[in-house]
Amino acid sequence: MWYKNNSFRFTRRFFMRVRVSAVFEQAGEILCMKYIYGGKEVFALPGGGVDKDIPLQEAIVNEWKEELGIKVDIGDIILIGEAPAGKRHPQTLHVVFEAREIRGTPKVRSDATHSLDVAWVPLEKLSSLPLYPDVGKQLSASFSEEPRRSVAFISNCMERGYW
C-alpha cells in the first residue's frame, strides 16, 4: 500500500524500469536489431531504457540516433507490456511506439550497442520469432487489423499544473 506523508513523499519505495522502443514497418518487414544470446539469434525492437527527466519519445529518438545512426519520427503507442522482475533484471514496463518515418540508412554503431547487425523481419514471422520484448504475436495481430489501433500518447499530462 502507498502512503503519502505531509511533504508528498512516498514512504514505501517502488522501482520499475521503463524501456521504450519503436516499430518501423517497410514493405511488409519490421526493423529489428540482431543479437546472439546463449548461442541463439535473438531480435530486439530498437530502443532502450529511459533516463531520468527524459521524455519517452525523446528517449527513443536518442537511442535510434546513437545505436543506428538515423533520425526517426515517433507516432502513437502501439502497445504497452510488463515484464516481471527476474534474477538479473528489475520489473520492466515496455512502451512500444510506432516509428512513422526514418531518415538515413540504419547501421549498427558498435560503439553504442552490443547488437551484431540490423535485420528486416517479415511481418508473418513475428509470431514465432525470439523477439525482445516478447510482443511478436501482439505486433502481428496489430499489423493485420484494419484500421490499426493505437493508444494516444500524451507527452505532458500535467501541462495545466493543477497540483
Image (tube, rainbow, N blue to C red):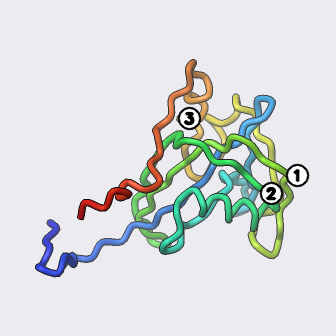
Label 2 residue SS: loop
Q: Are marks 1 and 3 in contact (CB under 8 Å)?
A: no
Q: Which residue is mark 1?
A: 105
What is the x, y in percent for residue 159?
Answer: 38, 57
- Circle nearer the N terminus (1, 3): 1
Label 3 residue SS: helix
- Circle nearer the N terminus (1, 2): 2
What is the x, y in percent for residue 30?
Answer: 73, 40
Number of residues whose C-alpha sits closer than 10 Å to that of mark 1, classed few (under 14), some (14–19) or many (20 or more): few
Q: Are marks 3 and 2 in contact (CB under 8 Å)?
A: no
Q: Are marks 1 and 2 in contact (CB under 8 Å)?
A: yes
Give the residue displayed 82% in from the left and 49% down from the top: 103
- Circle nearer the N terminus (3, 2): 2
Q: Is residue 12 above or below residue 83?
A: below
78 or 42, which is in the foreground?
A: 78
In space, the residues marked 1 and 3 are separated at their CA atoms by 27 Å
In space, the residues marked 1 and 2 are separated at their CA atoms by 7 Å
What amino acid is labelled 3 in the image? Lys
Left/right placement of residue 39 relative to residue 134 reads right
Question: Residue 41 appears in which quarter of the rendering?
Answer: bottom right
Give the residue displayed 72% in from the left and 37% down from the top: 25
What amino acid is labelled 2 in the image? Ile
Q: Which residue is mark 3?
A: 137
Give the residue displayed 56% in from the left and 20% down from the top: 147
Q: Which residue is mark 2?
A: 70
Number of the label disc, if any, that sits on residue 31: none
Label 1 residue SS: loop
Give the residue displayed 77% in from the left and 55% down from the top: 71
